[in-house]
């Protein structure tokens, strides 16, 4: 896997994150005294486990990306959410990318997000990333790797002068 292609890592991170969310849902169901989540449905006004799953999913992604720019899955696979310029996103972009996550999951399990990641070239952005002007980058030595589609930095004056004098 080339270091610039984050798609395989994103898929792995999403699978880890889904596992974490399912564990959280199981804990909440246990707290309500029903491992089958029917007690959860009664306690939250008949909205059922689906509403709770969506709420937990949103809160998990939103709060962890807001605090650390990564979820547990992203941390394990050395990924981080960054603005297109490489800096850490603020509350607004994190909120936007996670609200649109619902669309990315349509019709099931990241299908739309997976298609948009292929359609956006090397940035591998899902719809939420496009709307929030973010992307997911590989973390190298504690810092996010620079975007893969950025031009190299300009030559310094010394490099230009040396090339002229050759």
Image (cartoon, helix red, strand yellow):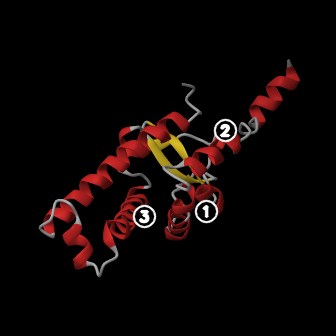
Give the secondary structure at mark 2: helix
Specify the quadrant that holds the C terminus. Answer: top right
- Which residue is disc 1 drawn over? 132
How far across and how far down the image is residue 30, in percent? 14, 62
How far across and how far down the image is residue 64, in percent? 37, 59
| Residue shown at the point (72%, 36%) measured from the top left | 152
Cα–Cα gap, marks 3 and 2: 24 Å
State which tag comes first along the sequence, 1 or 3: 3
Residue 38 showing in the rendered view: yes
Work out whether residue 100 or residue 163 is closer to the camera in this orientation and state it.
100
Residue contact between numbered discs 2 and 1, judged by CB atoms under 8 Å: no
How far across and how far down the image is residue 4, in percent? 59, 33
Specify the quadrant that holds the N terminus. Answer: top right
Cα–Cα gap, marks 1 and 3: 13 Å
| Residue shown at the point (56%, 48%) measured from the top left | 111
- Which residue is disc 2 drawn over? 122
State which tag comes first along the sequence, 3 or 2: 3
State which tag comes first along the sequence, 2 or 1: 2
- Which residue is disc 3 drawn over? 62
């Amino acid at each position: 896997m080339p270091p610039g292609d984050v798609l395989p890592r994103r898929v792995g991170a999403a699978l880890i994150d889904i596992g974490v969310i399912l564990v959280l849902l199981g804990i909440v169901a246990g707290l309500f005294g029903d491992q089958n989540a029917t007690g959860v449905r009664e306690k939250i006004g008949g909205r059922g486990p689906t509403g709770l799953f969506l709420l937990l999913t949103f809160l998990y992604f939103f709060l962890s990306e807001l605090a650390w720019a990564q979820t547990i899955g992203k941390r394990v696979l050395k990924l981080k959410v960054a603005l297109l310029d490489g800096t850490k996103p603020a509350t607004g972009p994190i909120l936007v990318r996670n609200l649109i996550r619902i669309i990315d999951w349509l019709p099931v399990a990241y299908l739309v997000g997976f298609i948009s990641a292929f359609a956006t070239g090397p940035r591998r952005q899902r719809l939420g990333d496009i709307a929030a002007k973010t992307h997911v980058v590989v973390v190298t030595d504690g810092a996010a790797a620079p975007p893969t589609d950025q031009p190299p930095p300009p030559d310094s004056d010394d490099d230009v002068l040396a090339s002229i004098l050759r």
